[in-house]
Image: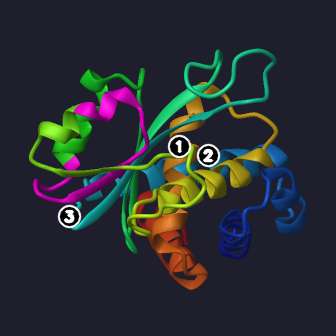
Amino acid sequence: MSRKQWTKLADMFIAGSTARVAAELAGVNRNTAIKFFHKCREVIAKEVEKENPFFDGEVEIDESYFGGVRKGKRGRGAAGKVPVFGLLKRNGKVYTQIIPNAKKATLMPIIEQHVQPDSVVYTDSLRSYNSLDVSGFRHKRVNHSKRFVTDNRRNHINGIENFWNQAKRHLRKFNGIPKDHFYLYLKECEWRFNVRQVSMLRKQLHYWLKRDLRLP
């Protein structure tokens, strides 16, 4: 590809376009655009994982489930869904990780690895978080059955829930994602949320692609 073509594809990727649309606008084969978009996500995931964040202060913690609409059970434990765990520093960045389940033995090591002791952690009422009550963290539990928080208006997990909503809205346009590739799409969403500014997204992606793929 020429510099003009890959630059156009990269900009279309940042804009949230599908590979099919990007291929038409960049004047390349559809399979070329698909492979290029996949490489973008591989590069992003590699760079995002290097950060290995360690949060302090106020941290929101939550788990979510990604996947197509299916009949039957929904929410926690829904068949065919991919469970994902997330940590978000208030007014800061988010960190996500695909998990096998939402049990205490799975979640607590992730929290201990990425959250500084004595931080204030906000969670919902999932039983897996009960251990936080007797840990080195200051645990605030959100009761979703109450519409308004009367004792402390900071007692919420709106930030991490907003990230889940943004990620699912972005992924919905792709009409199904193979489970083998879901990790790459998840890290893309994490990167977009953490960087936010389009100009910085563009600058980072162009730099990573030129370095890793030796593009002109």
Quadrant where the image shows the N terminus: bottom right
Is 27 on the left-hand or right-hand side of 52?
right
Q: Three-letter amino acid code at disc 3?
A: Asp
What residue lies at 84% left-to-right and 57% top-to-bottom? 23
Nearest the eye: 92 or 139: 139
Disc 2 is placed on an element classified as: helix
Q: Residues within 10 Å of mark 3 (few under 14, many from 20)?
A: some
Q: Position of residue 148 (x, y in %)?
A: 56, 61
Which one is earlier in the sequence, the residue at label 1 or at label 2?
2
Residue 101 placement: quadrant: top left
Which residue was labeled with disc 3?
56
Q: Position of residue 139 (x, y in %)?
A: 24, 50
Which one is earlier in the sequence, the residue at label 3 or at label 2?
2
Tell me which segment is drawn in magenta: 114-130
What residue lies at 40% left-to-right and 74% top-to-bottom? 91
Which one is earlier in the sequence, the residue at label 1 or at label 3?
3
Cα distance, mark 1 to mark 3? 26 Å
Residue 107 placement: quadrant: top left
Which residue was labeled with disc 1?
184
Residue 4 placement: quadrant: bottom right
Q: Is residue 122 magenta?
A: yes
Disc 1 is placed on an element classified as: helix
Single out the mark in the foreground, 1 or 2. 1
Pointers 1 and 2 in contact (CB under 8 A)? Answer: yes
Q: Is residue 77 magenta?
A: no
Which residue was labeled with disc 2?
38
